[in-house]
Image: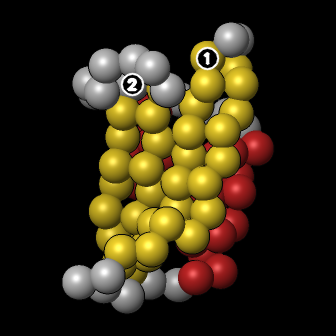
Amino acid sequence: MNTYRLKSYKVNVNDIQIVYSLIFQNSLYSCECYKEGYIRDDNNYSLVHNITEDEGEAQEFFDTIVKRCVYPVHIEDIVQDYFYY
């Protein structure tokens, strides 16, 4: 099972470094987001697996959350809204 981190960005939001990663594994895209230097709990870390198999859709979603500086606590809800509603 190969895992590839396709894109990774660090964004400074109110003196907090937020790291976003787009991951490709088993023909599906996943999204990881966390506050650097914080405990990886539900507020500071999010990893949503298997959000889509479509590369273009995954890239567009990823670019949107990075541009809007979404906090990790909100990633899962935004994935649900973006892909399933």
**What's the residue type where badge 2 is placed?**
Asn
Q: What residue sits 43% from the left and 50% below the top?
A: 32
Circle 2: is it few (<14), some (14-19), or many (20+) Cα within 10 Å? some
Q: Identify the residue position indicated by label 2 in the image.
A: 44
Q: CA distance from mark 2 to mark 1?
A: 11 Å
Res 16 label = 1
Q: What residue sits 65% from the left and 70% below the top?
A: 59
Q: Is residue 1 visible?
A: yes
The percent coordinates of residue 56 (x first, y second) are: 65, 80
Instruction: Give 8 or 51, whichever is nearer the viewer.
Output: 8
Secondary element type, mark 2: loop
Q: Quadrant of residue 13?
A: top right
12 sits left or right of 6 in the view: right
- Tell which circle, 2 or 1, labels the residue nearer the N-terminal end: 1
Q: Please tell me whether residue 30 is drawn above or below residue 11 in the rendered image.
A: below
Instruction: Give 81 or 8, whichever is nearer the viewer.
Output: 8
Q: Quadrant of residue 55?
A: bottom right
**What's the residue type where badge 1 is placed?**
Ile
Q: What residue sits 53% from the left and 54% below the top?
A: 21
44 sits left or right of 6 in the view: left
The percent coordinates of residue 2 (x first, y second) are: 32, 82
Q: Quadrant of residue 3?
A: bottom left
37 sits left or right of 1 in the view: right
Instruction: Give 40 or 65, whichever is nearer the viewer.
Output: 40
